[in-house]
């Protein structure tokens, strides 16, 4: 079971859409789609805590009245900064369980809401649209800032959450924040053929679900088995992706790729050398296209879920250092590593 944990959440889309998977394989995979969501797995007794449902600490009320369940880790001691953290595809507010306490211990408060369509949101499983996700992020940034006047506000996004923040912070009316932290953001041009195929399936078979078990590949998203177990058994994790959501995510990734050169304000981008979800070529294109002022942090041993991998401590130390003093070299040395374009053979 543990070896199959990676075929979940934002783990399942990327191999399906990798350039080496042609449209014929895509059609064959989709032919095996389910029409119902699979049941939530029950953990064995020794891992019972991994299946717990943690109630939200608060609810953020968005502009249209939608209520976003949110987890909160308050800074211990003097509050140095506050972070709004956005999770990845098919994930939830619980994505930040390993990182939230560690950042709080460094004086950084973390707010982690469920994104619309995910976690405990009322439209769980649906796709709200890239524009709506971006508007929600702006609402949440405003609400969090109002709760912490005078405290530097940072935005942090993992995978899909990072793509949402790229779109948000490229807008002329982007919120005034101290910085943006992008963890392996899902910024990737998939090509017109793949996009058209996904759009077609979303239109003609919107109830089809992809569970990840259809894929003829083994994908590793993180190597911290405790964190991977929690992701697998967490009742908030979505275990089947509906076709409109799959198509919508592809559209969001394209939109983020278009927006990336216009990213505003200080930013830190982290990427792991063992990422099997956002391929090196896609990240190298983003690496080159971002504004020169963006700090690029390459962690050779890091997997896609950088904060749920054994490189978590290094990534967290880099994030905390960049928040405290963005002009200093990062502790991991990842900002002094060879350029990703070179490592990708570009």
Image (cartoon, grey):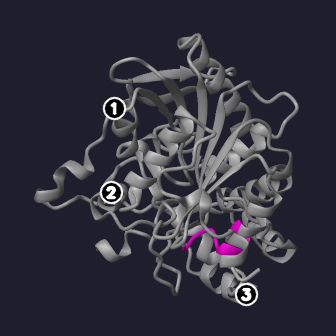
- Residue at (68, 27) in percent of width and height: 177
Q: Position of residue 237 (x, y in %)?
A: 43, 52
Callout 2: SS: helix
Which residue range is magenta in the image?
276-283
Q: 222 left or right of 113?
A: left
> Which one is in front in this view, the residue at disc 1 or the one at disc 2?
1
Residue 200: name its quadrant.
bottom right
Q: Residue furthest left?
A: 45
- Residue at (50, 40) in percent of width and height: 321
- Residue at (48, 59) in percent of width and height: 305
In the picture, the quarter occupied by the N terminus is: bottom left
Q: Position of residue 29 (x, y in %)?
A: 60, 82
315 w.r.t. 323: above or below = below
Location of mark 1 (residue): 105
Residue 238 appears in the picture as rendered: no
> Which one is in front in this view, the residue at disc 2 or the one at disc 3?
2
Q: Are marks 3 and 1 in contact (CB under 8 Å)?
A: no
Q: Earlier in the sequence, mark 1 or mark 2?
A: 1
Q: Position of residue 97 (x, y in %)?
A: 36, 43
Mark 3, Cα crowd under 10 Å, few <14 / some 14-19 / many 20+, is: few
Mark 1, Cα crowd under 10 Å, few <14 / some 14-19 / many 20+, is: some
Q: Earlier in the sequence, mark 2 or mark 3?
A: 3
Q: Earlier in the sequence, mark 3 or mark 1?
A: 3
281 is within the stretch colored magenta: yes
In the picture, the quarter occupied by the C terminus is: bottom right
Camera-side residue: 123 or 300? 300
Gap between marks 3 and 1 measured at Cα: 46 Å
Location of mark 3 (residue): 22
Location of mark 2 (residue): 227
């Amino acid at each position: 079971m543990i070896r199959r944990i990676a075929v979940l959440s934002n783990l399942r889309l990327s191999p399906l859409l990798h350039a080496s998977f042609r449209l014929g394989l895509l059609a064959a995979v989709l032919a095996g789609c389910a029409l119902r969501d699979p049941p939530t797995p029950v953990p064995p007794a020794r891992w019972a805590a991994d299946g717990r449902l943690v109630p939200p600490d608060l609810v953020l009320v968005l502009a249209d009245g939608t209520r976003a369940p949110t987890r909160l880790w308050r800074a211990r001691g003097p509050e140095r900064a506050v972070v709004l953290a956005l999770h990845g595809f098919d994930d939830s507010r619980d994505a930040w369980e390993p990182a939230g306490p560690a950042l709080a211990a460094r004086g950084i408060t973390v707010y982690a809401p469920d994104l619309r369509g995910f976690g405990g949101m009322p439209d769980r499983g649906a796709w709200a649209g890239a524009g709506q996700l971006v508007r929600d992020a702006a609402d949440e940034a405003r609400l969090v800032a109002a709760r912490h006047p005078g405290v530097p506000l940072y935005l942090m996004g993992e995978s899909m959450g990072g793509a949402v923040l790229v779109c948000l912070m490229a807008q002329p009316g982007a919120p005034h924040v101290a910085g943006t932290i992008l963890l392996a953001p899902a910024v990737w041009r998939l090509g017109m053929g793949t996009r058209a195929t996904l759009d077609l399936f979303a239109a003609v078979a919107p109830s089809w679900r992809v569970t990840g078990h259809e894929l003829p590949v083994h994908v590793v998203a993180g190597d911290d088995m405790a964190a991977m177990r929690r992701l697998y058994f967490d009742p908030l994790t979505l275990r089947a992706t509906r076709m409109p959501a799959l198509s919508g995510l592809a559209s969001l990734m394209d939109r983020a790729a278009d927006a990336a050169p216009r990213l505003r304000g200080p930013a830190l981008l982290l990427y792991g050398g063992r990422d099997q979800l956002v391929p090196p070529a896609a990240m190298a294109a983003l690496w080159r296209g971002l504004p020169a002022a963006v700090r690029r942090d390459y962690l050779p041993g890091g997997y896609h879920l950088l904060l749920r991998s054994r490189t978590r401590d290094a990534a967290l130390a880099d994030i905390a250092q960049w928040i405290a003093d963005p002009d200093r070299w990062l502790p991991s040395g990842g900002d002094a590593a060879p350029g990703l374009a070179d490592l990708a053979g570009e």
